[in-house]
Image: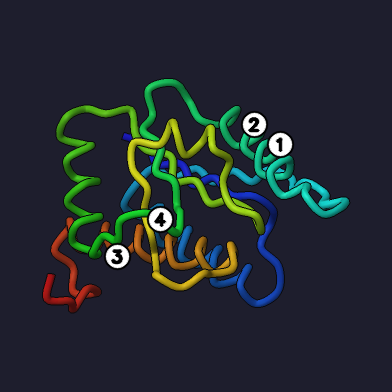
Amino acid sequence: MKLLLLAVGRPRGEAADLIAEYESRARRYFPLDVGEVKEEAFRRAGDAARVRDEEGKRLLARVPAGVEIVALHETGKPWTSQQLADWLNELGVRGSPGAAFVVGGAYGLSDEILARARHRLSLSAMTLPHEIARLVLAEQLYRAGTILRGEPYHKGRD
């Protein structure tokens, strides 16, 4: 089973180092590929839907056939760290080709991605910048790996 983390844009500043650190840690537990697509330029009022659609096309082009899409979205269902670990374990047990976690840009994800997503995942009830969402996701993938191997990193009750 392979995991894919797809995101719009490259992380910048101090967040970039933390994202790289947790993506590296997650790779200790899962085959993890990271893909970034170019941010679409926002030109005028009313372009948000066009931006989402163009970025969505680029994101979907990177999703291999048969891979389950998990859209990170504000209307998604919140999972505990244990639920994420259990779901990843289930994917592996049933021989799934893997999962693609998709993080949208400043204007979110396209309707096409949301329609194709097997799951919508919310990391918080609050709106997060896409770089922070990517950081939280990378850390949670690492945490899921430690949970599945029974390592002491995760101290939650779930």
| Rendered residue at 39%/57% (across/down) | 26
Q: Nearer the viewer, mark 4 or mark 1?
A: 4
- Residue linked to disc 2: 57
Asked whether the residues under the numbered discs 1 and 2 touch, taking CB atoms below 8 Å apart as contact, a structural biologist would say: yes
Helix, strand or loop at disc 1? helix
- Residue linked to disc 1: 54
Percent position of residue 77, x then y = 30, 56
- Residue linked to disc 3: 143
Q: Residue furthest top?
A: 65
Helix, strand or loop at disc 4? strand
Residue type at the position of mark 2: Lys
Residue type at the position of mark 1: Glu
For marks 4 and 1, the one nearer the N-term is: 1
The numbered disc on residue 11 is: none
- How crowded pointer 4 is (Cα within 10 Å; few <14, some 14-19, many 20+) is rated as few
Residue type at the position of mark 4: Thr
- Residue linked to disc 4: 75
Asked whether the residues under the numbered discs 1 and 3 touch, taking CB atoms below 8 Å apart as contact, a structural biologist would say: no
